[in-house]
Image (spheres, rainbow, N blue to C red):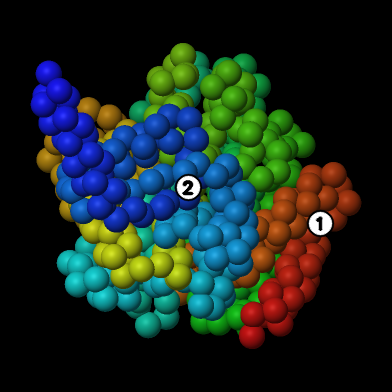
Amino acid sequence: MLKTLMMGTALVAASATMAAAKTQVTWWHAMGGELGQKLEEIVADYNASQDEYEVIPTYKGTYTETMTAAIAAFRAKQQPDIVQVFEVGTGTMMAAKGAVYPVYQLMKDAGADFDPDAYLPAVAGYYTDTDGNMLSMPFNSSTPVLYYNKDEFAKAGLDPNTPPKTWADMEAFSKKIVESGAAECGFTSAWISWAQTENFSAWHNLPIGTMENGFGGLGAELTLADDLRARHWGNLAKWQKEGLYRYAGPGGGDDANPAFQSGTCAMVMNSSGSRAGLMANSKFDVGVGMLPYYDDVEGAPQNSIIGGATLWVLQGHSKEEYKGVADFFTYLSSPEVQADWHQFSGYLPITKAAYSLSQEQGYYEQNPGADVAIKQITLNIPTENSKGLRFGNYVQIRSIIDEEFEALLGGKKTAMEALQSVDERGNKLLREFEKANQ
């Protein structure tokens, strides 16, 4: 009995030693709820797939809270190996000299099999420097699309299988929907900044600012005040007064999806990452279409740009930990893991192989509309105007966009005046950021 007990104790001790021998890799993330549970599942599967490394994920709150926590931890020399940062934090992370270990360099140093061309161009381009080097690892990338209520389309005498293509269609369809009594409003939208300004600009191949939308350096300036964007913002204000469009609030527009799901508005523009939730929680047939465009603009539509977040590696850790990070990133980017994450979440597959695998598995045939986001961001090769944006202090600039749009809706400014104010106020923040990071 004593011998058996001693053997059992030895086995436990040996197991503990083996577990302790694993190199630990820390990952701070901003995924809560079902997405957080799925993330934990991915990590658990990785940890079980090999015996060299153990990834330890820690939820740190919202994107802003997670990035702020990582910056504070770095100053205290207690930073994680990996931190998840939303796309508008890219400029800030790039400017954090000495804090970031660029992914292309990490993968090279670790001897990992890494091909930047394997990733969707519109995804990789957002996180790539002007020399074509990938700085962080894409993980959860989304783009805004148009969702519409097929039942209300039918009630209004519209073809439920034909979403509007142009902004002229949006106006005409919305009038028909409201006048027929099918719904109280034609459409709403989340994110005036992301959907109706940044993506609107890329979709029409317009620059948001100078120096390749900030990719070229810290000296960039915003250039949003032009005739087309003033026309669009002005139309939104006009349609709001006419009851065709309903403003859903600042930032992410928390009221946008509820207004759609309740049947109040027949259409909503929001993240492709909203698709699974909208499909599951709407009591009507949901259709998916591409973002509308102004058909008198040459070259439109071009391609939409992404939102979501990416994984940054922080300096200050051992070579063994960085080998673990590289190994984990290779696992995360594998077609099977990415296809599963994409199909579960509604986020884009970050690699061409994951997209192909989803096609082979019949996912898009079984889930009509699930590939609209991918078709939209890959519609054309991204240009300097449509590969994304990279401005410092951009989180604050998005708040300015919201404030100025609300000033337009309140009748305090014209569309051009509101956009000119965005440029003026935003450029002050850009100069502050430039001065602090030179």
Q: Secondary structure at mark 1?
A: loop
403 and 107: which is toward the camera: 107
Vertical position of residue 88 compared to residue 429: above or below: above
Kindly indicate the quadrant of the structure image that contains residue 106.
Answer: bottom left
In the displayed image of the protein, which residue is found farthest to the right?
Answer: 412
**What is the x, y in percent for residue 204?**
50, 62
**Which residue: 24% across, 46% down?**
17
**What is the x, y in percent for residue 200?**
54, 56
Kindly indicate the quadrant of the structure image that contains residue 304.
Answer: bottom left
Is residue 237 something one can see in this rendering? yes
Q: Which mark is residue 29?
A: 2
> Horizontally, is 335 left or right of 134 in the view?
left
**What is the x, y in percent for residue 112?**
20, 67
Q: How many marks?
A: 2
2 and 143: which is toward the camera: 2
In the displayed image of the protein, which residue is found farthest to the front?
Answer: 2
**What is the x, y in percent for residue 103?**
35, 69
Find out whether the residues at labels 1 and 2 contact each other: C-beta distance under 8 Å: no
**Which residue: 56% across, 75% down?**
95
Q: Amino acid at mark 1?
A: Thr
Q: For mark 1, does the 10 Å Cα neighbourhood hold few (<14), some (14 to 19), or many (20 or more) residues?
A: some
Q: Which mark is residue 414?
A: 1
Q: Amino acid at mark 2?
A: His
**Which residue: 16% across, 30% down?**
6
Work out how far the residue at label 1 is from the one at label 2, CA to CA, in angstroms.
40 Å
Q: Secondary structure at mark 2?
A: strand
> Horizontally, is 306 left or right of 348 in the view?
right
2 and 151: which is toward the camera: 2
Is residue 204 something one can see in this rendering? no
